[in-house]
């Protein structure tokens, strides 16, 4: 006879039996579940490939034109593919006829939009001739550098951000100076409301003398960025202003084209965004060669800082002998700009980009010269220039050889310049002179878009 368990106490034998039952159950079911999952999913592991985005035809294009300078209210639009249709320029519409350009007077900033066949090869620029000033209307890009800006009494700059979309956009601006990185909390997290423009006067936000470099990064939305650069020397008749172009990234070798001839003040500004000291050698560019001028020493650029090199004497003499560019060869990536104040007018030469296919630039009226350099091989560059009515006013060919380029004078009436390299790539810019000087760089046009590859997050 077995004794019954005392009230309030559990039987050891029954509890132990339940644990054995659960263990047996799990031992039987788990292998069955695993076999069932393998039968459904298979035994092959899922491989995930990181595929690059695919290229697709461009069906819409957006450009951002900065606020016009005094005497520079015009926005001119053209298409490299001679497409025709309606283009929006700010709040207005313009009809673009095949082979012609369209122009509107817009004082404030303006967003240029085109769709369909007009989107590939869409180009626009803002310019004026009293005094002479011009700039390209850029596409929104995520990051770019502006080198040689100022925030002082004699040299000041304004950074302008244009938001082409209806949603808000945000930009972060890193500032480098001659003594290193500059603390600028006002330039971090800059909010630009939808369809709005923000103008940031550097002299008010971070007043200081010396040369600065700005790294503008869009962290939310889309923005176009541009810089107005003003030289206001004491004793001069009045300040002189022109636009300062941007640079997509730092690079070890840069060729800056568009150096006006004559006596004046020339300042080459180099910025080192890296953490190591860099050294740079300077050479001058002519139609026939690239040479190291006598008396120019190697330039040292401290980490995260800018350096200014005065070239007034050297370039004053060299431009009279045919020099129209400066080449910078550094031991690491740098950004660069060359500011020239000649005949009381400021202009900027910026690093040129290789042109590999047919491209188009809109330019203001005035004496102008196409300047080419650093050809990748022996080839020919075809040039066609048209006036405001679309009439062809010049058709020429420039033969180029490895490492060299050439120049071509263009008619004053030309407002659209088409350049087509054949069998080679080449660097190019158009120097316009009149009541002052201004420079417009050539670059490959955006004719296609990218579509990212999207896949499931889990197998």
Image (cartoon, rainbow, N blue to C red):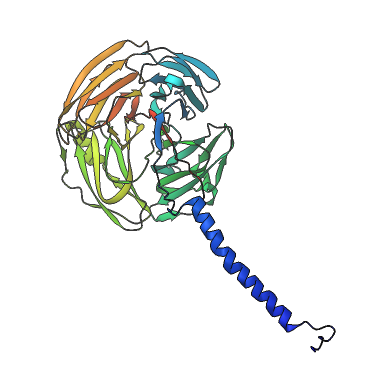
- Asked if 78 appears above or below 142 in the picture, the reply is above
| Residue in the image at 59% along x and 63% along y | 29
Query: Measured from the top left, where is residue 374 in percent x and y?
Result: 21, 35
Query: Measured from the top left, where is residue 301 in percent x and y?
Result: 31, 53
From the viewer's side, name the closer residue of 56 and 49. Answer: 49
Query: Measured from the top left, where is residue 197 in percent x and y?
Result: 54, 34
Q: Is residue 296 left or right of residue 151?
A: left
Quarter assignment of residue 417: top left
Query: Measured from the top left, where is residue 62 in percent x and y?
Result: 47, 28
Quarter assignment of residue 288: top left
| Residue in the image at 23% along x and 30% along y | 372
Can residue 202 be seen at all in this image of the molecule? yes
Q: Is residue 350 left or right of residue 69?
A: left
From the viewer's side, name the closer residue of 45 and 456. Answer: 45
- Asked if 392 appears above or below 74 in the picture, the reply is above
Which residue is most to the front? Answer: 1
From the viewer's side, name the closer residue of 436 and 172. Answer: 172
């Amino acid at each position: 006879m077995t004794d019954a368990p005392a009230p309030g106490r559990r039987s050891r034998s029954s509890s132990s039996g339940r644990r054995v039952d659960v263990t047996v159950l799990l031992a039987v079911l788990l292998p069955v579940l695993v076999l069932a999952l393998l039968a459904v999913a298979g035994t092959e592991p899922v491989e995930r490939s990181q595929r690059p985005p695919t290229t697709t035809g461009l069906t819409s294009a957006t450009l951002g034109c900065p606020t016009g300078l005094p005497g520079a209210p015009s926005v001119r639009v053209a298409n490299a593919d001679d497409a025709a249709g309606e283009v929006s320029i700010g709040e207005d519409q313009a009809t673009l006829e095949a082979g012609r350009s369209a122009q509107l007077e817009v004082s404030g900033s303006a967003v240029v939009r085109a769709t369909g066949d007009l989107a590939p090869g869409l180009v626009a620029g803002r310019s004026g001739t009293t005094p002479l000033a011009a700039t390209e209307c850029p596409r929104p890009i995520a990051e770019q550098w502006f080198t040689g800006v100022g925030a002082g009494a004699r040299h000041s700059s304004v950074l302008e951000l244009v938001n082409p979309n209806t949603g808000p956009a945000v930009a972060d601006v890193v500032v480098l100076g001659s003594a290193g990185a500059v603390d600028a909390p006002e330039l971090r997290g800059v909010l630009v409301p939808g369809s709005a423009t923000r103008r940031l006067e550097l002299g008010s936000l971070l007043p200081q003398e010396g040369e600065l470099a700005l790294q503008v990064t869009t962290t939310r939305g889309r923005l176009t960025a541009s810089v107005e650069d003003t030289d206001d020397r004491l004793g001069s008749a009045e300040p002189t202003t022109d636009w300062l172009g941007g640079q997509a990234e730092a690079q070890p070798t840069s060729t800056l084209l568009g150096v006006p001839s004559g006596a004046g003040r020339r300042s080459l500004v180099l910025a080192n965004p890296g953490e190591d000291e860099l050294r740079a050698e300077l050479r001058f560019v002519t139609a026939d060669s690239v040479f190291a001028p006598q008396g120019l020493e190697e330039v040292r650029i401290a980490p995260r800082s800018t350096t200014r090199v005065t070239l007034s004497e050297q370039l004053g003499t060299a431009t009279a002998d045919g020099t129209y560019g400066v080449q910078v060869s550094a031991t690491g990536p740098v950004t660069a700009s060359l500011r020239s104040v000649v005949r009381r007018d400021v202009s900027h030469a910026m690093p040129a980009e290789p042109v590999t296919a047919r491209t188009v630039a809109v330019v203001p009226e005035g004496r102008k010269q196409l300047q080419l350099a650093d050809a990748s091989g022996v080839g020919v560059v075809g040039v066609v220039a048209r006036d405001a009515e679309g009439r062809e006013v010049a058709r020429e060919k420039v033969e180029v050889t490895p490492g060299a380029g050439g120049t071509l004078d263009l008619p004053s009436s030309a407002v659209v310049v088409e350049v087509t390299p054949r069998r080679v790539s080449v660097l190019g810019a158009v120097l316009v002179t009149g009541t002052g000087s201004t420079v417009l760089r050539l670059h490959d046009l955006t004719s296609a878009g990218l579509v990212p590859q999207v896949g499931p997050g889990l197998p």
